[in-house]
Amino acid sequence: MRIVSITATLAVLLLAGLTLDAQQATQWPGIFRTPLVDNPSAAVNRFTFQPGGREKAHTHPFGVVLIVLSQGEGELLQGTETYTRALQAGEVYYTEPQESHAWANVGSSPFDVVIVTPRVDRVPGGTAPPIPLAAGITAKMALDSPDSTVRRVELGPGARETVHSHPYDLVVVPMTAGPMELQLAGKTETKNYGTGDAFFVPRNTPHALANPGKESRAVFAVAIK
């Protein structure tokens, strides 16, 4: 398991293939899943680990991007090695395909994560250089893996992206709650978004984010290769 730690938008539920369901129990006691995105390109789920919640070691045929949403005491099992970590919101973890791993909550408080899993049989996306950043916006690479890249994007008060598109699909995950404006395929909507809400932007779809608030907002942009 390769770990990338970053001290770290938004949920739009009107796109084709995107669903938001109620929290569901998993096969592991004390771990709950809330589906956020499910389409031919990627699946995105929010997991809540209650104290004592523990996965069994398992593997996936795909790479897994995990974004920590809240602080907690986590235990990571990698192969035969076990690590205990004080998790911080905004840390990013990556699991390679077929890599044995497991998570557990060894603390006294719940913690939440968002997991993004590109589909093995997806249509690969294209490549393009990063778009120029508008005033008040910064971006920092958090992860570059064979199947995805993750950038932390911060929008200062009043910052606004120019309308643009990408030749690849995009999942956006918020790290700070508050109002955000999303322009997508010619429609504009301003909403209050919570930490960990997610939305999917299909490839080649014009879109832009803006921060109408008086405080900075942070999001993770996960590009599906």
Image (spheres, grey):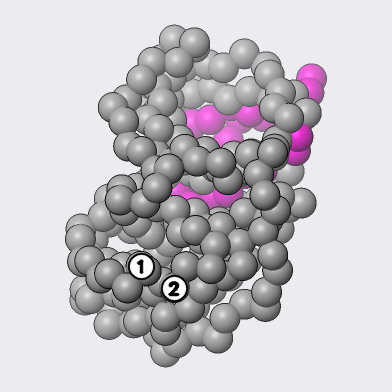
Residue located 49% across and 54% down the image: 171
- Judge the density around disc 1: few (<14), some (14-19), many (≥20) Cα neighbours within 10 Å: many
Q: Mark number for residue 206?
A: 2
Q: Earlier in the sequence, mark 2 or mark 1?
A: 1
What is the number of the mark on residue 21?
A: none
Query: Is 211 on the left-hand or right-hand side of 170?
Result: left
Q: Residue at x 68, y 19 (%)?
A: 58
Check the image and report above or below for 180 versus 64: below
Name the residue tied to disc 1.
184
> Separation of disc 2 and disc 1 at Cα?
6 Å
Of helix, strand and loop, which one carries label 2? loop
Task: Tell me which amino acid carries mark 1.
Answer: Leu
What is the chief secondary structure element of the magenta stretch? strand
Q: Which residues are magenta?
A: 70-97
- Picture quarter with the C terminus: bottom right
Residue at (31, 31) in percent of width and height: 21
Give percent across and percent down for residue 214: 21, 76
